[in-house]
Image (cartoon, helix red, strand yellow):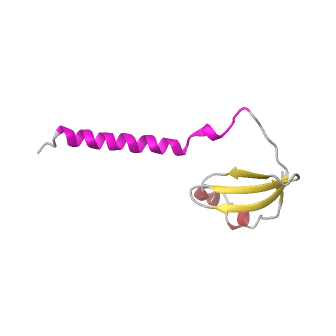
Amino acid sequence: MRKPIFVRFYCAAILLLVSTASLGHHSPARFSDDQIVSVFGTVVRFDWKNPHVYLVVSDANERAWLFEANATSNLRRNGCGSFCKQRTNSQVD
């Protein structure tokens, strides 16, 4: 039996809304590709949360810098598991 046209339209509209919402998660709008910033400081916090890993670094002026790394599964696969979690209070450049 064929589904009524409004049911097919409703399903298509839901799929469209869900797909556009998922694009917002990977938007590069927060980042600047035309500016390079170097930070030297101490790792204050290493947050190992899904879907990404966050690193907080305190510089010489005691400003906190937040860095967003790749997905936890990708870092673990590349050898950055418990070793990276133990890097708090380490100097980074």
Q: Residue furthest left?
A: 1
Q: Residue furthest front?
A: 62
Viewed as shown, does residue 66 lie left or right of 93? left
Question: Picture quarter containing residue 19?
Answer: top left
Question: Picture quarter containing residue 26?
Answer: top right
Q: Residue 19 magenta-drawn?
A: yes
Viewed as shown, does residue 11 lie left or right of 26? left
The residue that appears at 69% across and 67% down in the rendered structure is: 82
The residue that appears at 87% across and 51% down in the rendered structure is: 61
The x, y position of residue 52, in whole percent, is 61, 55
Residues shaded magenta: 5-34
Q: Residue furthest right?
A: 60
The x, y position of residue 2, in whole percent, is 13, 42
Viewed as shown, does residue 55 lie left or right of 9? right
Location of residue 18 with respect to 55 vertically, above or below: above
The residue that appears at 71% across and 61% down in the rendered structure is: 46
